[in-house]
Image (tube, grey):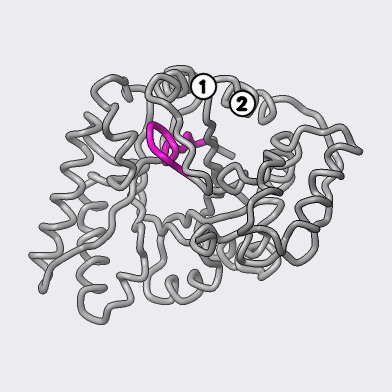
Amino acid sequence: MKLVLGVANLNQSYGLNNEKTSEKKSIEIINYSKDKIKYIDTASAYSGFNNILYKINLEKFKINTKISDIKGKDFNEVYSDINKKINLCLKNYKKKKINILFLHRPREILNKRRGKYIIKSLKKLKQKKIIKQIGFSIYSTSEILVLIKTYKPDIIQGPFSLFDQRILNSGVLKILKKKNIKFQARSIFLQGIILNKKILNNEKFKIHKALLLRWFNWLKTEKLDPELVLINFIKKHRYNLDSVIISAKNLRQIKKNFLYFKKRRETNLINLGIISKKIIDPRKWN
């Protein structure tokens, strides 16, 4: 199971409380990680990270990136737009090729006409070895079965954590494995909201307070660090995962995360039961 550095939260407001990891802390995280991790997860939409590119060196990283809002009325226009987006990425990241190109909004391929042009364009770029793998970045497990009927990607990136086991419980993870489609886990800390008791005071999560209290009280009783438990859940399922995205808001936290992935320390895993989408889907937090 490969580790991938996530940068969505770096140098910009992020998460429920719009907390910002400063430029200085962001650079520290990247510089520390580059000798310990091979892959980095980027996107044109991650403006905070893109604004510090001139201050960091990505030479040691293989780039995974995302594109969306693909335009064009015919194949040539669609191919040109995708190529333009990719060339901008390559220029910004000072790379000659992309390891994984994810469609940030993969439902774009379901468009009857443009969808075919998008798929054809991606295949062409893969043949030219500008991109190594083609992937979908999804929010909902239910999207996957619809999407893979239209096109079988190399990899799918989606939410997976102790709190969000939809892809596991639905059996979709087994389907992907049978079809030889890799899965990359993200949101293993649920954008950090399940790491800090401050969430208990947030009005938006008032109706879920009992569940969250159960989580934090269990951690206290077991004398466990939340990151350790959440990472151990991922490690338990490592044989079903190709890779996992990890992120942090400061140097201390990224060091701790690397340590927890490396060290062998078994812990109990609490069964939280059925969890509302209003907790696990950040789109429903507003």
Bounds of the magenta segment: 4-14
Q: Which residue is mark 2?
A: 258
Return the x and y of residue 112 as percentages of the image width and height: 26, 81
Q: Which residue extends farthest right?
A: 221
94 vs 199: above or below? above
* Crowding at mark 1 (Cα within 10 Å: few <14, some 14-19, many 20+): few
Q: Are marks 2 and 1 in contact (CB under 8 Å)?
A: yes
Return the x and y of residue 216 as percentages of the image width and height: 80, 44
Q: CA distance from mark 2 to mark 1?
A: 8 Å
The disc labelled 1 sits on which kind of residue?
Lys
Task: Return the mark for residue 36.
Answer: 1
Return the x and y of residue 185 as percentages of the image width and height: 56, 49
| Element carrying mark 1 | loop
Which of the two discs, 2 and 1, labels the residue nearer the N terminus? 1
Q: Residue at x 40, y 19 (%)?
A: 24
Give the side of residue 226 with respect to residue 122, left or right.
right
Give the side of residue 244 with respect to residue 8, left or right.
right
| Element carrying mark 2 | helix
Residue 109 among magenta residues: no
137 vs 112: above or below? above
Q: Residue at x 81, y 29 (%)?
A: 265
